């Protein structure tokens, strides 16, 4: 896939850029954007639980984001994000020109697009990609010291105030310095250097010093390090990730590593130290921490192009030896394969099938996915009787949204390295039913309200845990948001507010009706967060009639999601529809053969359906999976048929039926 193989060296790179642009044009679903908007408005602490030393690591990005939002809303943010993404890869294409032609570049862009598809939402990670590409490009092309100092130092100052990845600037400069020192060893190469190693070393120090030009001086560096050392809580790709059991990206990353190894074996050129080292660093980060895949693509892009070129030239030589004149067919064949792969990659994105399959709540186009958060709740959250921010707990998913849209102090959000790890552990344990963690949280913070995002896996058990204590009541529920208040007289105006409660259920019914109208129309139905969240909550609260209605509809819309079949099967099990439950849960085990929950539920269904042989087989599989998952040590609850006695939590739910 060298320049010789490409009849039109630029058209394939352009097609690859089109693919990158299509990936970037997606509705915003990341909860992190709301934190940036909230910080951009005031740059003041938005949480009442942040450690005293915590500071904002993205002050300039937040200010720019808030300005863009004020001008053009979510569409402006998406457009600028796409432009930054394209600019990053255009710069990398300029660097990669030396190492491969348009066809190799097109294949590299195709591969990068698939790598970043899950995570390339609107956020400062795109700014990181742009600045890494800028530094690689400028340090690879500029040879005049005055230009390097005059351009890179201001860029470093900007980078420092935009994103916490700014230390990559000096690191890239260090690698270039080492590369320059290595190049000086050969006298014949001195004319190609253009800048002395000593000057490059001085530039590295100057860039490092430039990182101190920020509102917080060295405190910014400390906060960045804290975020690396204590990353939780973090958000990566989708709030529905656990529900869809999204497959790992490691096989695709491993494919890139194999291509790189193939390139090294067949390469006939000397590798630049900087590009090689960056590719190795990127590969290590991506394989050990898949959420760093966007960084991996920019660090490794020139090396990917080089690998495709080397492999292409090797194949061309082999084909020429074996096929003689027929080897010239390799060029049009390779071009046709790239075009076909690009088309086959773009169609699922614009049709939303790719988003539906991977459990993303985004879709192709412009806009914001506000239904994922506590939206349209002014009447409740701004009511004079609703507890203040300091008396309200929330999960990370809703933190930024609450801070920006309701101007409230929050408990936590997704910013890493700024909340006490003990608090995060206790909050998680409390939701999972640990009484000691509940007591510590209650004694320390005395919460009067708890806002739960039902898409978080701990929320399902959390609602049950809290309502079982009898001092909490469910004040609002709309599928994705559940709000609980202490059962106190002062909150009676909210707990008895039928208008607000009905509004939540009306929203849920509207989501159900909208999804039902789309069922049968393929991927257009998407992933209805309201139905997924409500189905799990109704099932947890022992409301199998409602949960069955929801999961049955979800199965009609997308029958390839194991968790939907598990939900349907457990609903049928609670309704004593044992044969139907067994069939649904058997389907779940077929779709997810390594799901402990699916097999445990199936074993229970077999027990009540009086199928001893199937039960024995299922229980044997459960034991194997428990052995395999010993590290997790999580005990899956076994669903039981509904008893004649009413469960304690059932009467706490709003007594309104979900229309079927």
Image (cartoon, rainbow, N blue to C red):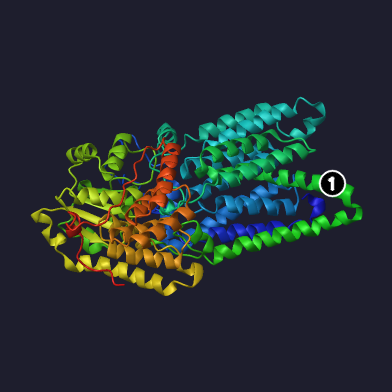
Quarter containing the C terminus: bottom left
Residue farthest toward the left in the current orientation of the protein = 489
Numbered circles on residues, count: 1
Can you give x and y, in whole percent of width and height, for residue 592 in the image?
47, 52
Q: Give the vertical position of 656 relative to 31 (above or below).
A: below
Can you give x and y, in whole percent of width and height, for residue 385 in the image?
15, 57
Q: Give the vertical position of 122 relative to 208 (above or below).
A: below
Q: Is residue 464 visible?
A: yes
Label 1: element kind: helix
Q: Tell me the quarter of the picture where residue 440 sits.
A: top left
Viewer-nearest residue: 496 or 34:
496
Residue farthest toward the top in the current orientation of the protein = 185
Residue farthest toward the bottom in the current orientation of the protein = 517
Q: Give the vertical position of 453 relative to 554 (above or below).
A: above
Q: Residue at x 35, y 69 (%)?
A: 512
Q: Give the vertical position of 223 relative to 482 (above or below).
A: above
Viewer-nearest residue: 491 or 249:
249
Viewer-nearest residue: 40 or 518:
518
**439 to the left or right of 268:** left
Residue farthest toward the right in the current orientation of the protein = 325
Residue beneath disc 1: 318
**376 to the left or right of 16:** left
**199 to the left or right of 82:** right
Viewer-nearest residue: 119 or 603:
603
């Amino acid at each position: 896939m060298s320049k010789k193989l490409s009849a039109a060296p630029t058209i394939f790179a352009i097609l690859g850029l089109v693919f990158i642009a299509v990936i970037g044009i997606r509705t915003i679903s990341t909860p992190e954007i709301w934190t940036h908007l909230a910080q951009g408005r005031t740059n003041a602490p938005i949480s009442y639980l942040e450690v005293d030393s915590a500071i904002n690591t993205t002050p300039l990005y937040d200010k720019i984001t808030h300005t863009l939002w004020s001008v053009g809303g979510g569409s402006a943010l998406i457009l600028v994000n796409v432009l930054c993404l394209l600019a990053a890869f255009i710069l990398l294409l300029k660097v990669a020109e030396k190492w491969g032609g348009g066809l190799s570049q097109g294949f590299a862009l195709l591969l990068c697009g698939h790598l970043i598809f899950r995570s390339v939402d609107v956020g400062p990670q795109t700014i990181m990609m742009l600045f890494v590409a800028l530094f690689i490009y400028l340090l690879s092309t500029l040879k005049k010291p005055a230009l390097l100092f005059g351009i890179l130092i201001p860029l470093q100052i900007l980078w420092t105030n935009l994103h916490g990845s700014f230390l990559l600037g000096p690191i890239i400069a260090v690698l270039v310095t080492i590369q320059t020192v290595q190049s000086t060893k050969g006298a014949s190469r001195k004319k190609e250097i253009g800048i002395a190693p000593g000057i490059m070393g001085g530039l590295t120090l100057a860039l490092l010093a430039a990182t101190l030009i920020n509102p917080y001086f060295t405190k910014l560096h400390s906060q960045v390090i804290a975020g690396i050392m204590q990353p939780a809580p973090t958000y990566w790709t989708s709030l529905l990730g656990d529900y869809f059991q999204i497959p790992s990206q490691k096989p695709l990353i491993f494919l890139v590593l194999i291509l790189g190894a193939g390139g090294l074996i067949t390469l006939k050129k000397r590798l630049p130290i900087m590009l090689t080292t960056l590719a190795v660093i990127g590969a290590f980060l991506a394989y050990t921490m898949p959420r760093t895949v966007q960084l991996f693509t920019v660090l490794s892009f020139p090396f990917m192009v080089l690998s495709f070129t080397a492999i292409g030239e090797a194949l061309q030589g082999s084909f020429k030896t074996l096929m003689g004149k027929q080897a010239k067919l390799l060029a049009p064949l390779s071009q046709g394969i790239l075009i076909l792969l690009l088309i086959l990659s773009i169609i699922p994105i614009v049709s939303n099938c790719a988003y539906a399959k991977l459990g993303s709540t985004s879709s192709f186009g412009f806009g914001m996915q506000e239904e994922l958060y506590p939206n349209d709740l002014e009447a409740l959250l701004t009511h004079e009787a609703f507890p203040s921010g300091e008396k309200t707990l929330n999960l990370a998913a809703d933190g930024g949204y609450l801070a920006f849209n309701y101007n409230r102090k929050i408990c936590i959000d997704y910013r890493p390295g700024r909340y006490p790890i003990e608090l995060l552990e206790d909050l998680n344990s409390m939701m999972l039913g640990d009484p000691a963690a509940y007591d510590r949280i209650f004694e320390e913070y005395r919460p009067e309200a708890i806002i739960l995002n039902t898409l978080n896996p701990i929320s399902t058990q959390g609602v049950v845990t809290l309502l079982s204590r009898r001092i909490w009541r469910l004040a609002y529920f709309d599928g994705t948001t559940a709000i609980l208040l202490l059962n106190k007289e002062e909150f009676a105006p909210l707990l008895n507010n039928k208008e607000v409660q009905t509004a939540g259920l009306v929203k849920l019914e509207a989501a159900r009706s909208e999804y039902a109208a789309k069922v049968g129309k393929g991927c257009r139905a998407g992933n209805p967060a309201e139905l997924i969240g409500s189905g799990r909550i109704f099932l947890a609260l022992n409301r199998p009639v409602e949960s069955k209605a929801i999961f049955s509809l979800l199965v009609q819309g997308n029958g390839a999601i194991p968790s939907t079949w598990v939900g349907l099967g457990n609903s049928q099990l609670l309704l004593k529809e044992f044969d139907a439950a067994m069939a649904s849960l058997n389907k779940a085990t077929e779709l997810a053969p390594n799901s402990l929950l699916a097999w445990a539920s199936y074993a229970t269904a077999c027990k009540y359906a009086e199928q001893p042989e199937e039960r024995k087989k299922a229980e044997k599989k459960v034991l194997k999976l428990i052995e395999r998952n010993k590290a997790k040590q999580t005990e899956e609850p076994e669903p039981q048929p509904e008893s004649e006695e009413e469960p304690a939590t059932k009467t706490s739910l709003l007594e309104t039926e979900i229309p079927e």
